[in-house]
Image: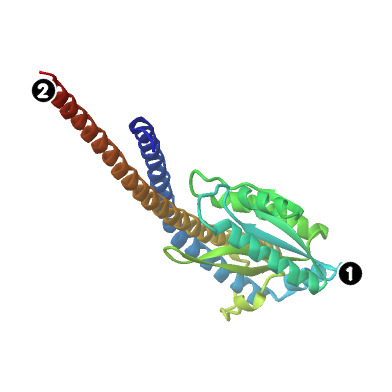
Amino acid sequence: MQSINEIQNRLKGMEDIKHLLRSIRAMSAIRWRKAKQHLDIAQTYADNVDAQLGMVIANTGSRMQENFASLSSRTSGKTAVGLITLTSDRGLCGNFNTGLVSKAIYVTEILNKKNKAVKIISLGGYGERLFINAGYEIFFSEKTPGAQAVAFTDMRKIIAHIRAFYKSGAIDELNILYNQFNYFGSYTPKSVQILPPQYQRFGTDPQPFNQKPIINSDPDELKSFLLWEHLAARLYLAYIESTISEHSARLQTMDSAISNLEERITDLDIQYHTIRQEKITQEVLEVQSNFRNRKKRD
């Protein structure tokens, strides 16, 4: 049986762990609220970019579409598919990362059967480690800041890399795989194709303009800018939803861990008081026994 000192040390250690878990939970709650605030703003910007892009495409024709089609058909043999996976840089969030990586491996196997070579683009250090441990090669990786919500400029930098890969022929198609937020504690892995662009989603019928839009800019240059801005906005939206899902999962994990720890503390506290009471009882019995022995001698 454990001594009182051993139990006291274990109780102190558990209280320290409980304090740490509560700190992690508090930080995740703050980041979850920040990400939720960014979601509506990012969605509004993405919708505005899509509206502008639809207007430009409707007024300038499909030359950009033909350019992208020629890019995607320039290679022979297997089609190179870039798969962006959005995971976290840290753990302690249940199966948020493992579930997404398992889905990515499943998608990779399906695409391989369709004569497509998957190149994994890992955004998030934890997912990168899981892929490497599973024996998969990482084509490109980037760690995402975990202290606060990622800036939209960071997504532009990533899209600049993607654009270079696409134009150089390193990839022909591009999909994003992320955990789509459903509601608190619920998320679903979702795959979205962003290259080649799905032009049908911009099927608007605006009034034609007589002058070049946005300070007489070149229509083709404007179209190219808006297209890549659209891709950056969609990647940013996916990242925000992934962040919301991550911290939602981490909050649930911390709540479960704290609840389990409190149960163990309660059990250990009962054990402590039981041993303490037994020790007090034993001391009383010894005092009483000594008193009786002295009385008999007298």
Relative to residue 224, is residue 143 depicted above or below? above
Residue 25 is marked as none
Disc on res. 295? 2
Residue 85 location, quadrant = bottom right
Q: Quadrant of the C terminus?
A: top left
> In the depicted view, which residue is nearer to us: 193 or 259?
259
- Name the kind of residue labelled 1 in the image: Gly
Of residues 84 and 138, the one drawn nearer to the viewer in this rendering? 138
Residue 62 horizontal side relative to residue 203, left or right: right
On the rendered structure, is 279 left or right of 163? left
- For the point 65% across and 73% down, which residue is it? 57
Give coordinates of residue 267: x percent, y percent. 33, 47
Label 2 SS:
helix
- Does residue 207 sit above or below 14 in this rendering? below
- Amino acid carrying label 2: it is Lys
Which mark is first along the chain, 1 or 2?
1
User: Where residue 273 appears, x then y in whole percent?
Assistant: 26, 40
The CA distance from mark 2 to mark 1 is: 104 Å
Quadrant holding the N terminus: top left
